[in-house]
Amino acid sequence: MSISSLHCLLAKLFVGLSNYRVFAIVKFSVLNLDILIFLQRQGYIGGFLVFANLKAIKVFLRYIGIAQVFRLKNQVSKQARRVFLSTKRLRFFLSNNRLSYNYLISTPFGFFFGDEVLEYAFGGEILFYFS
């Protein structure tokens, strides 16, 4: 998994959402594609188009009126410090840091939000959180 690719994806989405753009163009990677599929299924983005010849993905951002559907807060796993947690430690982390954020967690079974991971009782890598 390329964390630098994740960082570029989050930066482009953040800039696009902050400037109320209709779409954002991000670099193609399997990780980015998997995250975008997950975000689209959850209703956080409007969709995306993959341009294989340009190695890019055009992400259509969603708004409700003039409000953003979600606000990116921070990336947790970084290239120099990746954060993997077992089920027990993840339960402790999420109970202390829940607030009003959604945590996106990569597991061996795919991407899940923090509450879903606790429900299924498996650990994983915390990628980023948003509200």
Image (tube, rainbow, N blue to C red):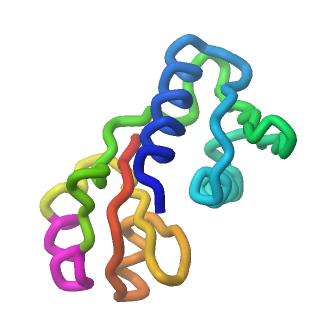
Pinpoint residue 98: horizontal percent, then vertical percent.
Answer: 24, 56
At x 63%, y 52%, the residue is 29
The secondary structure that most of the magenta stretch takes on is helix
Residue 40 against residue 114 in the figure, above or below = above
Quadrant in which residue 52 is drawn: top right
Left or right, 58 with reference to 32: right
Pinpoint residue 17: horizontal percent, then vertical percent.
Answer: 55, 22
Quadrant in which residue 64 is drawn: top right
At x 40%, y 83%, the residue is 119
User: What residue range appears in magenta?
Assistant: 85-95
Tell whether position 88 is magenta.
yes
Residue 110 against residue 58 in the figure, above or below = below
Furthest residue in direction front, as rendered:
53
Pinpoint residue 86: horizontal percent, then vertical percent.
Answer: 24, 82
Tell whether position 29 is magenta.
no
Pinpoint residue 21: horizontal percent, then vertical percent.
Answer: 66, 16
At x 43%, y 58%, the residue is 104
Q: Nearer the viewer, residue 91 or 60?
A: 60
Furthest residue in direction top, as rendered:
19
Q: Nearer the viewer, residue 100 or 34?
A: 34
Q: How many marks?
A: 0
Q: If the image is split into quadrants, where does the C terminus sit? A: top left
Q: Nearer the viewer, residue 66 or 49?
A: 49
At x 49%, y 36%, the residue is 8
Residue 3 against residue 130 in the figure, above or below = below
